[in-house]
Image (spheres, grey):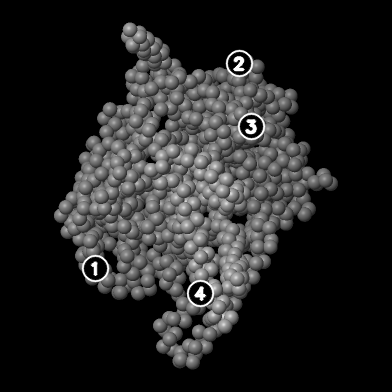
Amino acid sequence: MSWLRYSFAVFLYLLQCTDAVFEDQVGKFDWRQQYVGNVRFAFFDTHSQASKKLLVATEKNIFASLNSRTGELFWRHVDKTGPEGNIDALLVHGQDAVVVVGDGRVLRCWETNIGGLNWEVLLDTGSFQSAAFIGVQDFVKYVAVLKKSAISLHYLSNGHQKWVENLPDSDTVQYQTVYSGGQGEVLVLGLVPNSHIVIVSYNIEDGEIMEQMSVEAPWMSSLEESCVVVGRGILLCIDPITLSLYTLPLNLEEKAEMNQILLQSLDLEVSSGFQPLLTATQPNPARPPLTAFFLQLGPEHHILLDLSDGIITALRDFKPSRLATFATTGEKTVVGVMAPKNETACSINLFTVDTGRRLLDTTVIYHLDPSGGKPNKLHIQAFLKKDDSVGYRAMVQTEDFALTFLQQPGRVVWSREEALADVITMEMVDLPLTGTQAELEGEFGKKAAIQDGLFAMVLKRLSSQLILLQTTIGHLWKLFYDARKPRSQVKNEVTFETLSRDEFNLQKMMVMVTASGKLFGIDSKSGSILWKHYLENIQPDSAFNLMVQRTTAHFPHPPQCTLLVKDKETGLASLHVFNPIFGKKSHISVPALPRPILQTLLLPLMDQDYGKILLLIDDQYKVTAFPSNKNVLQQLQESASSIYFYLVDSSQGRLSGFRLRKDLSSELIWEVVIPVEVQKIVEVKGKRPNEHVHSQGRVMGDRSVLYKYLNPNLLAVVTESTDTHQERSFVGIVLIDGVTGRIIHDAVQKKAKGPVHFVHSENWVVYEYWNVKSRRIEFSVLELFEGMELYNSTVFSSLDRPHPPQVLQQSYIFPSPISTLEATLTEKGITSRHLLVGLPSGAILSLPKMFLDPRRPEMVSDQSREENLIPYAPELPIRAEWFINYNQTVARVRGIYTAPSGLESTCLVVAYGLDIYQTRVYPSKQFDVLKDDYDYVLISSVLLGLFFATMISKRLAEVKLLNRAWR
Amino acid sequence: MPSVRHTRLQCQVFVILIGVCACFSDVDPVSIATATGMQTNGDAFKIEGRAIVPGVRLQDWISTARVIVEGEEHVGFFRVDGIFTVNDVPAGSYVVQVVSPLYRFEPVRVDITTKGKMRARLVNYIKPSEVVRLPYPLQMRSIGPHSYFVKRETWGWSDFLMNPMVMMMVLPLVVIVLLPKVVNTNDPEMRREMEQSMNMLNPNHELPDVSEFMTKLFSSKSPTKTGGVVGRVPKGGATKRR
């Protein structure tokens, strides 16, 4: 029960140190952007004319409803990641959306207005093939789900299974499609590749096989890719080899044959090497599909055809045309076609489906984004105007995962950058100085002083002061002007012109790299995207490494970022060098990298243009420098003996340290092998290079100093056991000096397993693991101290540190699973540190590092009280006040980025995952600026009051003295 | 004799307590522990329950809420009637949480044996084997909205005046300033009465009394002060008049 007493003490302590968001600060300096990921299925709600819903299911296993007028989310449901949450199919009927999830494992029906489930049923295992609504007498009543070997029918109203039947000969026949024309029939189409098609007809009431027939089709290899159902149950297939269409009536009793129609006979020609594609539409699942269909003959050639009574007629030829799609509103179905207009724009037009006639006044111009990808999907939301003509809005999906919603005549209503749902890495770059600031800087430049004479310099000085005065007045005027407007109307439009560093460097440029290969530059204050750049030909699943080579501090040299893109399979890498403020690609020549890159190293050394030198180490341990000119090579030669790097080979469990030679080759210095049979290396982390530690030691209760072991070369290596049995699994942590390879400390956590999240900073490592025995998450902290005396207080050298550090460790229970872990970072490291813990609920907890201090005593003593140590309590507290993002949860938080600001008290935080959230935290409160709730009125009134009081009392005292003198 | 009876009574109470404990821990934790060990084989089960937020309509919160089991290992969604199901959960012991950005719910630990027997209990991380049973299917009841925000310290006269420090300063001041005006201290009868009452309150004459000290201080000061001024003024006046 003693812990209870301690927790009470902790509680008392907490009362003093509340660091939280105030309600009036909501949205003041934080923002969140919610994303859904690349859209796989999208449906406009056509249930009613006024409906604004756009239902999307995405590759990120998300089902969401968007507001089609604004592009914002109505609601969003985040399923688990991986194939178990994968959305296989989405069917929409009225208010209900039926979703098949996890390779046909779960069938869900969502109520789209509320965003809750109508029902959810678990299906038998089996690989999912297709799903369809089954209509009976103009009424959609059932959902059919086709698996590899079975078909099941469910009531749409409650999800109950009506019947489930095994498919005949499912080991040889690949059943791929289920079709219903609305007359209560259930047809399952299967295929034996290059042999024949199988059509099975089921009785809707009891699932009995009514009919079964097979039709010869020796040319067909896939039913799904080459066939559609058109009109009243006619199967239409295309054969890319003989270039002919085949038709087959599905409801024939006797043995039928496919009717071949050569494309040549229709005067159609397929572009060479192009696989022709068929597209048909069934606007209402209770009615048969339309007779019109699209045939795509080339990458920019579509044709609208019509099949009635076995005769194919061409309705309209669209050449050139990029995308074509059907859209239905009420009883009317139209065709939307996107055609290239010129280099930078496309036009979208509507055509009637029955005649192919162009509808007047339906042109929408879509401007291609030069920094984006090509459009690859077109969604049309058609609606009936008051005069019964068809109006529409269009949503264009591009290959860089962007959605653009357009209105006539080409106004972009909204756009969403869904690539941001998958941010891999990011950096924050200081904004440049304004023009006037830059001019002031330029005035003191060396070159200017030599060129101009004394008089010119004086003039220049005066003029720059004038400009400064002018901008100050302008700024004040703007402040005054804005203050009179209500707060909601004040819009700070951020453009490149207004983009400049603020007083405390709180506004920065966020450079974000996404998995799709699209780069973004986002203003950290407003969250608006200032630039984007799509890198084409990026292999999926590539690794990215973003480095800031030159910051904005070196005017007039532009800032420079380098992105290393590495193909995970081959290991081959390429460099993309760009300006992080404007996103423009730099013209600097980039070294060719013919060999796989193992490691990159950004040196603190700079070339003559103030760019940090980047070293790239390939698989032959050869080093390439970027930039590589004479100056750089000379610098490298001079300092080669003090440049060390390490390599990790987790497949062989090998950690090795190298030293750079003068000829840019390298020599092996040390090697540590961790046996892969027992444990595997999970992650290796050094310290952040931009981290400052202010105090060298800690003052103890008895006034002595405990010095920190601040080794900048220390690496923390986390290993996990290969044996996952709960009695034998363990997590290991090894601290290795990266220069000498000396193992500083080595700890094993028994009966523990990953995933391990850890932070390595200053003289401590905090790591988190799953305790298998007690089934809980535990945090452990390691702190390293030199002892009471410092060996060499001026400089740290790994080669000259004879005494091993003292290691203190303590562990705690954390009452929640965690997603990610990061520590706050400030300019000078004076502010106390907090740990930022991303929780699966989407909250980001700011946990004071003070709670993870191995010196927390079990028994409170005077000394520990003097040191402000909290008594040990096994459980770490989680309090809602510590959630820095209050109710703005970040779904699937993957990483937290922290950056120092110009203010020592303030740390900028960006949490990214599915959403992006940016805020500021003050780990030791705002000690260096006045708080924003500072009561100016009170302080000035008190001051004024005191002033007048002294004046009056002085006067009174004088009068009194005078009176007394007269007495 | 009474002491003996007392101890016997204590013993009885103790025995009853043990009995209660035994009732609670009817499923031994060892079998569950082995169940977690072999998660991979065996059937998958489903966790069911219902969640309510008192006083709030379901459609106002279920679209932003979901059920997560042991991190995001398994996810469940809410039906429009507030019932949730988490499918495909293998045997083991899990912490089930209802997460909503608006409302707080207590997590519940659910144990599933390999045979599919379910049990819900309170989450206790410090003593993981302690069993305090909860109903199954789960009944999650919100314990109110999240308190994300701290109230700002607002400045008001009432706060200022009700501050204990201010009260301690102001009240004696009032007493010192007002009392001499209300009570005429020059009246000898009154003074005697007051002295008497003071003596009654403070019977110990040895101890220096605070009030006495204060009165002394004030009474001794004011005459000297006035005296000093009076003494000086005539001088100055005299010189001036000359």
Q: Identity of the amino acid at label 2? A: Glu
Secondary element at image label 4:
helix
Q: Disc 1 or 2, which lies upstream in sequence?
A: 2
Q: Is residue B85 visible?
A: yes
Q: Looking at the image, is A61 positioned above or below residue A503?
A: above
Of labels 1 and 2, the one closer to you: 1
Tag 3, which secondary structure? Answer: loop
Q: Label 1 is placed on what type of residue? A: Ser
Q: CA distance from mark 2 to mark 4?
A: 82 Å
Q: Which mark is residue A437?
A: 4
What amino acid type should be assigned to the residue bearing mark 4?
Gln
Q: Which residue is mark 3?
A: B56
Name the quadrant of the C terminus of chain A. bottom right
Which image quarter: residue A951?
Answer: bottom right
Numbered disc 2: what chain?
A
The residue pinned by badge 2 equals: A208
Q: Which residue is situated farthest in the front direction here?
A: B188
Cα distance, mark 3 to mark 1?
Answer: 68 Å
Kindly report the distance in space between the C-alpha atoms of the residues bearing marks 1 and 2: 83 Å
Please give the chain letter of the residue carrying mark 4.
A
Left/right of residue A357 with respect to residue A81 in the rendered view:
right
Q: Which mark is residue A639?
A: 1
Q: Whole-percent x and y of residue B31? A: 35, 18
Residue A119 or A464: which is nearer the viewer?
A464
Structural crowding at the residue carrying mark 3, measured as other residues with C-alpha within 10 Å and reported as few (<14), some (14–19) or many (≥20): few
Q: Residue at x 23, y 70 (%)?
A: A638
- Which residue is rendered at x = 57% and y = 36% of the image? B145
Judge left or right: residue A710 versus residue A822.
left
